[in-house]
Image: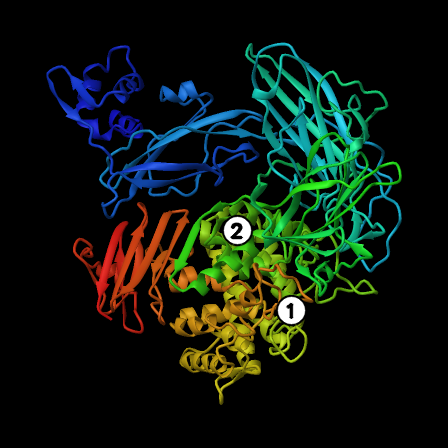
């Protein structure tokens, strides 16, 4: 490499002329180019004898929000070649057309080395690239339990380099199964492992068994530089060190198919270790790993992966360079703990008298404790405990918000009902005082019965098999408690107290009760508001339901099932992703589906598949095998790609996708599918359930067509052209069969003319081009015939929103969303719902916390505010601004923190005049569609049109497309 190439590689192209002269003068001297460059790295000018000073001009952009694998300085990252990403910040917010032309990343083993601009792990050199989304690490092999530091600088469109970013870091997990020396430990051997879980039908046993607690004491006799612990407890755990709970998250680890994957968590304990004696303490709950049947307690299914167990391994690095490992093995001690009942469905019982004081602190006397036994993990491999363990990081579950009672009633003497004012997922937290052995029973629920008592009937429970949280007092002053290993969806809490028996005099006194909102602590990416109060209320209704059902998986409801039903992962994907950063969750969902997939390619409707919905003969029911649900294995990763440009998720699961497409092909007859649940919960003459207004063959075949068209696009992205050609040809055959069997050319309707039938055909490109307007008109006609009410269900409503938005009929959606009579969002609000309900009419026989019908959320961002984001489109159209200025709305605005940066669109109408403000982040471009009479205001003029860039863009309904670069734009016009 010559002198010029070396200098450019390390980012000194601005000083290139002067530096080349100097380097050539001293080429024969014992100085390397690298040493010369290092000297100039810290100087704002280049100085050479007899040469004038050359100032470094500041870059117009700087890197911000440094992330690795879309995470902020992660601890416990198990990626061998992690992906770097960042966003760009403009030095001048008013600047336009800013972009990145190059970057350079430094990775070092210490902060001090990085501060000297030295990289002993990886130096990318200057890379000419506009990419700042997914830059793969390409340095030497990463080591387990090691912390790495990194930073970068970028060059703008003019080749001007930025200053170095602030440093970021990451700590690796145990990267290889052989890194595990710890053993799984338990109170007893795995006596019974259920091969297949059974759906619960009312039978219960009488027995309950207290959950074990573990402890282990160890010494630290030298100053500690770093201490990292890796831990997993099944089904769930809480880790203590020296009397302190170090798990700042809840319900760990994440739910998986434990026979194939067990997640572990990583914690930095450096600041918590003491010189001398230290002690670990661990509490265990059952979670989804072990779901018991117990008399008097509700459960959705019955199944177990084995006995509750624990594995823990801590790596301690001392300041003198030596290392030590503290690991779980038979030297650990174990006894029965205070959790006397634990069920992810039935609740939790806790007896505070059974927790020995100081059990998790050093110096505790272990009288009566027994040695733990070493056992195999859930996969049955005793010799290789690390084989199924994964450090994959998923969103942490946390207590995110608290709700205080808005009302307290006493429907019966001695029974109080607390109204928290909001339905949500989580648990009640209490402060109480009373005698030893006295009991507080907490019965949560979404609804009240006619007598003002909490009812759980809508969630499948009843007084003979209820969901209950119970706390038995130890009787030592004021006590605080909340469940640890179970949660529920509720608004109301019924409180019942007892003295605890003849030897315990007096009932306990409840001093306070509050609700703790527990869900995945995902990053808030979006914000929407408008001057239509009802729309803002609908937005909040949907948002609360999304969050309530984001607990390790995307559940259907936080009460009855808590299962990962798959159709909502892609149908509601945009509604979720406009609001929250969920890439890591969607990566987990894809992995869960792959692990649930059978050898013949079949993908069950839920994953992880904790219970198989089969009939008495063991045959699949529609609740297990439905194309609209199983197709999530193709459409969910694709949705993630559209928002995050994550090609890895597509490559990792490409073969899984192909196997499912082949499964559907084998099930098809004449290129049609005729089975499944169809448009679940549509509005027909009967109680909601399987599709009533639309043939199952329409929804199943339409989704099959969507699978094939998306799979062809994925194949091309991954360079699998032969597969793409095959998929495209098969999709064409399906399209022809679909129209041949379901389209009525004489009426321009599909199937029976339902909203779902016409909308799916339009949105998925199944309608012949010359009939699209007529089919759209029929869709609108049906909506108007139903007084602007929706009749589509879980599957169809998503496509109704798409068809109307893409067909420039947001005016129809506007009218639909204004309705306050049933069925509508407004009716749910009028009936007092605070989260989106399962049924359009808020039926009290159904769940009161479902997000499956929340597709209006996508329209709020994409249609009304006009931020249409899709990374699968050509770069000029990845950001499209096309607001729907409809109805009597005075203003609407949204902001969306995309992977490209923050996008904003805000429009208003004041005194009959329209105005629109748009913000596009540095490094991005956009296409904006403006009404023909809307013009840039002073300072917002467009750059000269690039005919090549805009020739393919066509407007409609009086709009005109323009291509714009980054920056802030303002437009105004008379209506």
Q: Answer with left or right where residue 469 lies relative to residue 49.
A: right
For disc 2, the neighbor class at 10 Å (few under 14, some 14 to 19, many from 20) is many
State the SS at label 2: helix
Q: For residue 233, what is the image quadrant? A: top right
Q: Nearer the viewer, mark 1 or mark 2?
A: 1
Q: For residue 664, what is the image quadrant? A: bottom right
For disc 1, the neighbor class at 10 Å (few under 14, some 14 to 19, many from 20) is some
Gap in angstroms between the C-alphas marked 1 and 2: 39 Å
Mark toward the start of the polypeptide (1 vs 2): 2
State the SS at label 1: loop
- Look at 17% across and 23% down and name the residue there: 18
Q: Answer with left or right where residue 316 lies relative to residue 765.
A: right
User: Quick one: quadrant of the N terminus?
Assistant: top left
In the rendered image, residue 376, in percent from the top left (x then y), is placed at 79, 34
In the rendered image, residue 701, in percent from the top left (x then y), is placed at 59, 72
Return the mark for residue 843: 1
Residue nearer the viewer, 185 or 105: 185
Q: Is residue 670 visible?
A: no
Residue nearer the viewer, 381 or 669: 381
In the rendered image, residue 498, in percent from the top left (x then y), is placed at 80, 44
| Vertical comparison of 138 with 530: above or below | above
Judging from the image, the colouring scheme is rainbow
In the rendered image, residue 255, in percent from the top left (x then y), is placed at 67, 45
Return the mark for residue 557: none
Return the mark for residue 650: 2
User: Quick one: quadrant of the C terminus?
Assistant: bottom left
- Look at 45% across and 65% down and name the residue there: 534
Q: Is residue 975 visible?
A: yes
């Amino acid at each position: 490499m010559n002198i010029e190439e070396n200098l450019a590689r390390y980012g000194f192209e601005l000083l290139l002329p002067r530096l080349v002269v100097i380097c050539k003068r001293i080429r024969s001297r014992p100085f390397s180019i690298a040493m010369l460059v290092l000297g100039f790295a810290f100087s704002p000018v280049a100085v050479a004898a007899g040469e004038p000073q050359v100032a470094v001009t500041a870059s117009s952009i700087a890197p911000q929000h440094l992330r690795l694998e879309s995470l902020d300085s992660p601890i416990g990252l198990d990626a061998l070649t992690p992906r770097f990403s960042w966003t760009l910040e403009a030095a001048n917010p008013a600047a336009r057309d800013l972009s990145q032309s190059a970057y350079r990343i430094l990775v070092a083993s210490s902060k001090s080395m990085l501060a000297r601009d030295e990289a002993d792990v990886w130096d990318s050199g200057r890379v000419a690239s506009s990419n700042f989304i997914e830059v793969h690490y390409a340095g030497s092999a990463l080591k387990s339990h090691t912390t790495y530091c990194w930073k970068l600088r970028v060059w703008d469109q003019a080749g001007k380099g930025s200053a170095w970013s602030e440093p970021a870091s990451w700590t690796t997990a145990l990267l290889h199964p052989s890194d595990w020396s710890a053993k799984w430990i338990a109170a007893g051997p795995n006596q019974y492992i259920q091969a297949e879980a059974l759906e619960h039908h009312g039978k219960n046993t009488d027995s309950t068994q207290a959950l074990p607690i573990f402890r282990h004491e160890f010494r630290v006799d030298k100053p500690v530089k770093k201490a990292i612990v890796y831990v997993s407890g099944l089904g769930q755990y809480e880790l203590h060190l020296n009397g302190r709970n170090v798990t700042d998250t809840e319900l760990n680890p994440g739910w998986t198919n434990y026979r194939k994957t067990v997640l572990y968590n990583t914690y930095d304990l450096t600041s918590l270790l003491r010189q001398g004696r230290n002690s670990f303490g661990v509490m265990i709950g059952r979670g989804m790993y072990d779901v018991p049947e117990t008399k008097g307690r509700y459960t959705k299914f019955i199944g177990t992966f084995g006995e509750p167990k624990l594995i823990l391994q801590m790596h301690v690095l001392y300041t003198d360079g030596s290392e030590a490992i503290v690991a779980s093995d038979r030297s650990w001690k174990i006894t029965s703990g205070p959790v006397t009942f634990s069920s992810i469905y039935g609740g939790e019982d806790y007896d505070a008298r059974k927790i020995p004081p100081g059990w998790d602190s050093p110096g505790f006397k272990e009288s009566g404790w027994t040695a733990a036994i070493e056992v195999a993990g859930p996969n049955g491999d005793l010799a290789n405990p690390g084989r199924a363990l994964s450090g994959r990081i998923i969103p942490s579950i946390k207590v995110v918000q608290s709700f205080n009672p808005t009302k307290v009633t006493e429907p019966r003497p001695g029974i109080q009902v607390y109204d928290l004012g909001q339905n949500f997922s989580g648990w009640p937290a209490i402060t109480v005082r009373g005698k030893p052995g006295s009991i507080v029973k907490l019965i949560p629920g979404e609804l009240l019965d006619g007598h003002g008592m909490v009812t759980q009937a809508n969630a499948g429970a009843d007084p003979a098999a209820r969901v209950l949280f119970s706390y038995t007092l130890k009787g030592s002053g004021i006590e605080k408690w909340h469940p640890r290993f179970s949660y529920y969806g509720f608004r109301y809490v019924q409180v019942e107290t007892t003295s605890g028996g003849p030897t315990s005099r007096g009932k306990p006194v409840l001093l306070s009760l509050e609700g703790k909102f527990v869900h995945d602590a995902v990053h808030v990416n979006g914000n929407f508001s408008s001057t239509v109060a009802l729309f803002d209320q609908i937005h909040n209704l949907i948002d609360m339901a999304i969050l309530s059902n984001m607990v390790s998986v995307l559940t259907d409801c936080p009460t009855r099932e808590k299962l990962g039903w798959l159709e909502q992962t892609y149908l509601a994907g945009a509604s979720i992703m406009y609001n929250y950063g969920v890439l890591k969750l969607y990566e987990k969902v894809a992995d869960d589906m792959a692990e649930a997939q059978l050898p013949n390619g079949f993908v069950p409707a839920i994953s992880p598949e904790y219970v198989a919905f089969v009939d008495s003969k063991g045959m699949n029911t529609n609740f297990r095998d439905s194309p609209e649900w199983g197709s999530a294995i193709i459409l969910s990763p694709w949705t993630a790609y559209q928002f995050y440009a994550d090609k890895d998720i597509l490559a990792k699961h490409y073969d899984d996708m192909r196997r499912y497409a082949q499964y559907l092909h084998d099930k098809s007859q004449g290129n049609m599918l005729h089975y499944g649940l169809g448009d679940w919960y549509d509005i027909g003459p009967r109680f909601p359930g399987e599709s009533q207004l639309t043939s199952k063959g329409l929804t199943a075949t339409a989704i099959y067509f969507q699978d094939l068209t998306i799979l062809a696009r994925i194949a091309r992205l991954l360079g699998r052209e032969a597969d793409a050609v095959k998929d495209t040809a098969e999709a064409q055959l399906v399209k022809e069969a679909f129209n041949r069997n379901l389209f009525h050319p004489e009426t321009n309707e599909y199937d029976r003319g339902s909203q779902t039938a016409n909308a799916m055909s339009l949105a998925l490109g199944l309608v012949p081009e010359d009939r699209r307007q007529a089919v759209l008109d029929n869709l609108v006609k049906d909506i108007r015939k139903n007084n602007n009410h929706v009749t589509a269900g879980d599957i169809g409503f998503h496509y109704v929103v798409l068809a109307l938005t893409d067909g420039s009929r947001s005016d129809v959606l506007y009218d639909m969303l204004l309705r306050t009579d049933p069925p509508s969002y407004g009716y749910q609000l009028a009936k007092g719902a605070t989260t989106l309900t399962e049924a359009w009419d808020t039926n009290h026989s159904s769940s009161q916390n479902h997000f499956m019908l929340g597709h209006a959320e996508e329209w709020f961002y994409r249609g009304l505010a006009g931020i249409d984001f899709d990374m699968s489109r050509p770069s000029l159209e990845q950001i499209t601004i096309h607001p729907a200025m409809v109805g009597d709305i005075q203003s609407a605005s949204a902001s969306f923190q995309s992977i490209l940066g923050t996008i904003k669109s805000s429009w208003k109408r004041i005194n009959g005049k329209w105005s629109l403000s748009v913000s596009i982040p540095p490094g991005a471009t956009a296409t904006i569609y403006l009404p023909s009479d809307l013009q840039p205001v002073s300072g917002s003029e467009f750059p000269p049109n690039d005919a090549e860039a805009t020739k393919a863009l066509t407007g409609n309904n009086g709009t005109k497309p323009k291509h714009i670069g980054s920056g802030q734009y303002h437009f105004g016009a008379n209506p």
